[in-house]
Image: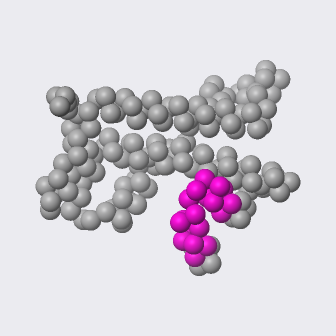
Amino acid sequence: MADETTSSSAVVTDTNKSDTYKVTDEQRAEVTAASSKLSAEIASITSSKQGAPNENNSTAANKPNANVEFEPPMACIRRLLKQVLPKSTNVSKDSLATISRASGIFVLYLTACANDVAREGRRTTIVAKDVMGALKELEFEEFVPLMEKFLGEF
């Protein structure tokens, strides 16, 4: 058994059970590399669908970085986690940042897939049924009934 040193602090601690989950620097690097790779894949998918930006495109020329990443605000992530986790659970800043990044990547991925569904229907506007179709296509069918219930309430 290899000796793993954990130079990083505990990521999530449940104070009732005193369980501590630690992340090694190697694991953190793997997650960062995987999220960067996924971000690059999403960027290449969306840029290939929209056409590569060129110097004549004024909107691309005005932006210093055309591949702007989306991360929801930490306060929103913290609020959501407080709603779903037991009150005795503490979440570190690293965990919040990781969850925020992962949720941002998921939103971009789902949006790109929903855009594909809308284009298959020869539409340029993404509507709720496109998002539902994207969830099914990405094999997240278990979320569809919850989303339909949410849409019914609002």
Q: Residue at x 76, y 38 (%)?
A: 49
Outermost residue on the front side: it is 1
| 74, above or below 23, in the image | below
Q: What percent of the width, then of the height, locates residue 54?
A: 78, 23
Q: Residue at x 59, y 67 (%)?
A: 144
Residue 126 seen anywhere in this rendered image of the structure? yes
Q: What sort of colour scheme is used for the picture?
A: one colour
Q: Nearer the viewer, residue 51 or 79?
A: 51
Provide the major secondary structure of the magenta segment: helix
Q: Nearer the viewer, residue 77 or 135?
A: 135
- Find out whether residue 91 is within the magenta segment: no
| Direction from residue 143 to residue 31 in the image, left or right | left
Number of numbered discs present? 0
Q: What percent of the width, then of the height, locates residue 81?
A: 36, 59
Q: Residue at x 76, y 27 (%)?
A: 53
| 149, above or below 77, in the image | below
Q: Residue at x 23, y 41 (%)?
A: 22
Residue 59 seen anywhere in this rendered image of the structure? no
Quadrant position of the C terminus in the picture: bottom right
Q: Which residues are magenta?
A: 131-149
| Direction from residue 41 to residue 99 in the image, left or right | left
Q: What percent of the width, then of the height, locates residue 29?
A: 37, 29
| Direction from residue 150 to residue 76 in the image, left or right | left
Q: What percent of the width, then of the height, locates residue 74?
A: 41, 49
Outermost residue on the right side: it is 122
Tell me where residue 61 sits by quadrant: top right
Outermost residue on the bottom side: it is 153
Tell me where residue 67 sits by quadrant: top right
Quadrant position of the N terminus in the picture: top left
